[in-house]
Amino acid sequence: MKDFKFSNTGKKLTSSIIRELLKDVSIPGMISFGGGVPDPSTFPRYELSEITQKVIEEEFSYSLQYGPTEGDDVLKKAYIEYLKKNEGIKGLSTENLLITVGSQSALFLLSLVLLDKDSKYFVSKPVYLGAASAFSMRSTNHIDLPLSENGIDTELLEKKLAELASSGEIKNVKFIYVIPNFHNPAGVTLSLERRKKLLELADKYDLLIVEDDPYGDLRYEGEAIPSMFKMAGKDRVLLLKTFSKVLSPGMRLGFVIGHEEFIRKLVLAKQAVDLCSPSLTQRIAGRFLQKYDLKELLKPTIDMYRKKKDLMLEELKKNFSDMQGVHWTKPQGGLFIWLTLPEGFDTMEMMDYGKKNGILFIPGAAFSIGGGCDNSMRLSFCLPPEKDIVEGVKRLKQTVLEYGKEKGLL
Amino acid sequence: MKDFKFSNTGKKLTSSIIRELLKDVSIPGMISFGGGVPDPSTFPRYELSEITQKVIEEEFSYSLQYGPTEGDDVLKKAYIEYLKKNEGIKGLSTENLLITVGSQSALFLLSLVLLDKDSKYFVSKPVYLGAASAFSMRSTNHIDLPLSENGIDTELLEKKLAELASSGEIKNVKFIYVIPNFHNPAGVTLSLERRKKLLELADKYDLLIVEDDPYGDLRYEGEAIPSMFKMAGKDRVLLLKTFSKVLSPGMRLGFVIGHEEFIRKLVLAKQAVDLCSPSLTQRIAGRFLQKYDLKELLKPTIDMYRKKKDLMLEELKKNFSDMQGVHWTKPQGGLFIWLTLPEGFDTMEMMDYGKKNGILFIPGAAFSIGGGCDNSMRLSFCLPPEKDIVEGVKRLKQTVLEYGKEKGLL
């Protein structure tokens, strides 16, 4: 290959496991629990189509033109109302919002304005891959916090923070990154108690919490827990939201909600990164939110996903409850179940066995920066039809048996 | 303000002059030669609206879903045909194209994969601000090449390259950035002779040329000059194109055309930066290109812009030809005229005089990294109606007279 004199950042870039894996999705007969994408039949396409026609024909001088880097005020105002009504978040003005090209762009912009090479930050283990890749482009000094059914381990966080404070390194800690609801990949939810503890620690050490909540609107059961942003406000928390799981990922609409000075800084970074998000998709979403009650429209989606989730949990129970050392999370929402096999299983290696049996999953190592989670895997239940969920879990069981026996683990 | 522990990159971010200036556009009665945005009446809104309806209702499982980071194959294939037909570029496959969130995102991704802190790169002086801001986020070691009516000074380039080669610093030179057609802000076009010279030098020193061509399709007169990409191919040149000036900036569609290995690297960077460009706007543009001849549809736009350009040149002649030391470029296309006043004029300072007289322009210093171009300004002719062009140039003349007299320059 020609030498293009790539930068050090450029040289380090490598393809993600998920990306490579998902290429096999198109093999005929393959059942995939891999991708974390929503079911396209849930997108309100007729509503969107009708609105779009007006937005293009009547609002073309906005919707087809360059827009402000900050984002479309129509969408911002509608989303502020949405957050007020559905999450009880009050007191926001348009200056507290930035509209980004999906949440990934928000994570990258954050990384840009917060992280230097020697910066530290807390993430969960397993971690959301998109956040890890955005953050590690600027700094690889992540500090991992294991996840349990109640979310990240706040006791360990407290201990680590005390250590960092006494060593003087706390000044390099830039933020604590959390997915509070129905974690990707783990499916778990941060308990109210732990949210409070997290805020208490963030206050004590004057740290920023980055609260990434793509799945909060997809709750299938149980009571919603207030966001940390709602509890502690913009001085302490930066809230990330997105329409990718509830309206349409193809529109690429993410939201950063935070302190106006912080938002201003992100806007400046965004000017250099992509100038502005698409006016067209922003205005469509803005008019959509004005006209429709998104929460209402989401109800059939929630019913469908709940059924699929319950079915997968049931099938996992049927197939794996007799197998010692196998356990899985029981999410109350979102798209993912995290399945853990006994020690010694290597789900990355097991992928080839899975493919032979016609079943795809994402190995746990994909969600771990620098190793770990080898005996776990992420299962997504939202996209496969119900019969594929039943058949897929059977194939998964068969794969586990084959691999386990061959490796002498069973 | 609360201390958010911004990164060094974050701390350095400041608002651009253009951005601040354009806030005054909404003052009643103000005539603006400032913004570089196309006239929204030129966007083919009815054609786009019709296509969009189908794209949303019938292709929702693509257009509303996550798309590949590389971009939509439908759009890529249609654009490859477009480039073949209209620019004579042959031999491209989809692997040679990346679709970005406008050209700004392409420039930023390039900066990410090419520049380290000690990297050097060549830019023109004046320089396109968006490129300067993307590049300088990673490295501030730009080497400036003055512009004349025939584009960048290739003689100076030759001299500087020889110096860098003999000092051994040439290994840090990553690329030469050029806007070959109807330069922003200068309006000038790189001559065929200079294109050849540039390629010869790039070959000699094994350097990459970044050929940014947002305006090439907006030629009002004269014969098109082949792109350097067409002349030298993907091993030597990376070509940037965009739909922002010819279809709709609000759709945010930029194209990087280059070596498949280079594109692959950009794709990896894009995964961390924004995951994928909007599927919706990509598919709309793809179907649009399949159905319509964009070049044909552009003809009325070109006629309109040509008239406005000719009018502004005529008015400049009427008003300024008696004034010694004032000269301006005569663009054959694009959106901009670059006006230079006698030494001593400071167009940044003159802005306040302009505003009082109801006329906005962009001062030359906005297009200069680290000073210079103080006595020049950028004038855009595409957006104001014809009567405003006449009146605006009058106001500009008055402003120059007032400022010049007050400062003892006239």
Image: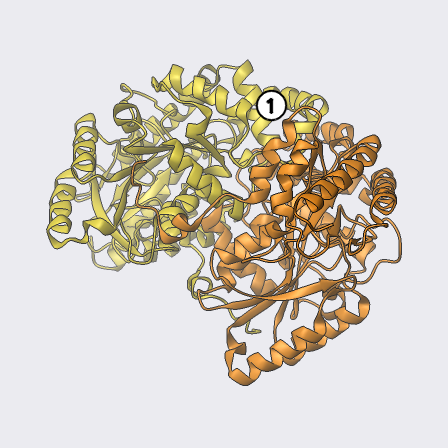
Chain colours: A orange, B yellow
Q: Let me know if residue A130 appears in the view.
A: yes
Q: Depth check: B41 or B295 in front?
A: B295
Secondary element at image label 1 = helix
What residue is at 60 percent from the left and 63 percent from the top? A260
What residue is at 89 percent from the left and 56 percent from the top? A222
What residue is at 55 percent from the left and 28 percent from the top? B72
Q: Depth check: B56 or A209 in front?
A: A209
What residue is at 33 percent from the left and 41 percent from the top? B185
Q: From the viewer's perspective, is B227 left or right of B62?
A: left
Q: Quadrant of residue B13?
A: bottom left
Counting every numbered tag in the picture gives 1
Q: x%, y% of residue B274?
A: 55, 45
Crowding at dot 1, Cα within 10 Å, few <14 / some 14-19 / many 20+, comes out as many
Q: Residue furthest bottom?
A: A166
Q: Which residue is mark 1?
A: B48
Q: x%, y% of residue A144?
A: 61, 65
Q: Chain of mark 1?
A: B
**Vertical placement of residue B315 versus A290, above or below:** above
Q: x%, y% of residue B180?
A: 29, 32
Q: From the viewer's perspective, is A353 left or right of A391?
A: left
Q: Depth check: A72 or B117 in front?
A: B117
Q: Amino acid at mark 1?
A: Leu
Q: x%, y% of residue A324?
A: 80, 55
Q: Let me know if residue B214 appears in the view.
A: no
